[in-house]
């Protein structure tokens, strides 16, 4: 996996080999694209077929090697960020550890000594314009000095 890439199991409750075997018995003439569209978003599947990530053929024409490939692909689908739009469009995430649960001076968790939270891991949201970056840097410095 490349740096920052994330693997996602698109079908966590359904191993693809089991689905395909079931579909072979009930819908063998139907296309893989149509059958996958019953368990994943249709436009997503159409995009995968268009970029040739999944074969565009009938269920009963899928080989065992293709089933193995589909299992690897759909159960370990990777998202690979290819860059950012820079600080100009950067924004903040919402949520995180409640500020009542940490020390405002050291950023140490009150219920778990030795556990620290900084930046966007904390439920603090500032206005756009660098305030969130400043909080991330300042909380990091305060925490670092406390450790």
Image (tube, grey):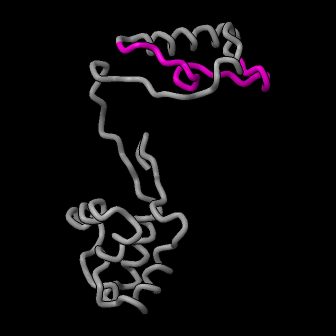
On whether residue 1 falls in the magenta region, the answer is no
Q: Residue at x 46, y 10 (%)?
A: 134
Magenta region, mostly helix, strand or loop? loop
The reply, left or right, for residue 83 in relation to residue 76 is: left
Residue found at x 35% / y 11%: 129
Q: Residue furthest left?
A: 50
Tell me if residue 102 comes above or below residue 22 in the rendering. above
Residue 40 pos. (x, y %): 38, 64
The quarter of the rendered structure image containing the C terminus is top right
Q: Quadrant of residue 46 in the image?
A: bottom left
Q: Please provide the residue range marked out in magenta.
A: 108-128
Number of numbered discs visible in the structure rendering = 0
Q: Image quadrant of residue 67?
A: bottom left
Residue 51 placed where, x, y %? Answer: 22, 62
Above or below for 120 versus 31: above
Spot occupied by residue 85 in the image (x, y as percentages of width and height) = 27, 28
The image shows residue 93, relative to residue 53, as above or below, that is above
Residue in front for this viewpoint, 125 or 69: 125
Q: Residue at x 57, y 12 (%)?
A: 139
Residue 125 forms part of the magenta stretch = yes
State the image coordinates of residue 65 (x, y, percent, origin top left). Answer: 39, 80
Residue found at x 27% / y 19%: 88
Q: Is 128 in front, or is 69?
A: 128
């Amino acid at each position: 996996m490349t740096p920052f890439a994330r693997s996602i199991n698109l079908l966590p409750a359904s191993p693809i080999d089991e689905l395909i075997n079931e579909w072979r018995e009930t819908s063998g003439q139907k296309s893989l694209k149509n059958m996958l569209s019953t368990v994943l978003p249709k436009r997503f599947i159409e995009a995968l077929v268009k970029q040739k990530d999944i074969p565009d053929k009938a269920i009963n024409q899928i080989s065992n090697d293709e089933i193995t490939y589909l299992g690897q692909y759909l159960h370990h689908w990777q998202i690979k960020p290819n860059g950012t739009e820079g600080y100009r469009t950067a924004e903040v995430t919402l949520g995180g550890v409640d500020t009542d649960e940490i020390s405002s001076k050291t950023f140490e968790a009150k219920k778990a000594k030795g556990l620290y939270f900084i930046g966007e891991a904390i439920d603090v949201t500032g206005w756009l314009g660098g305030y969130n970056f400043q909080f991330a840097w300042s909380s990091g410095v305060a925490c670092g000095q406390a450790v």
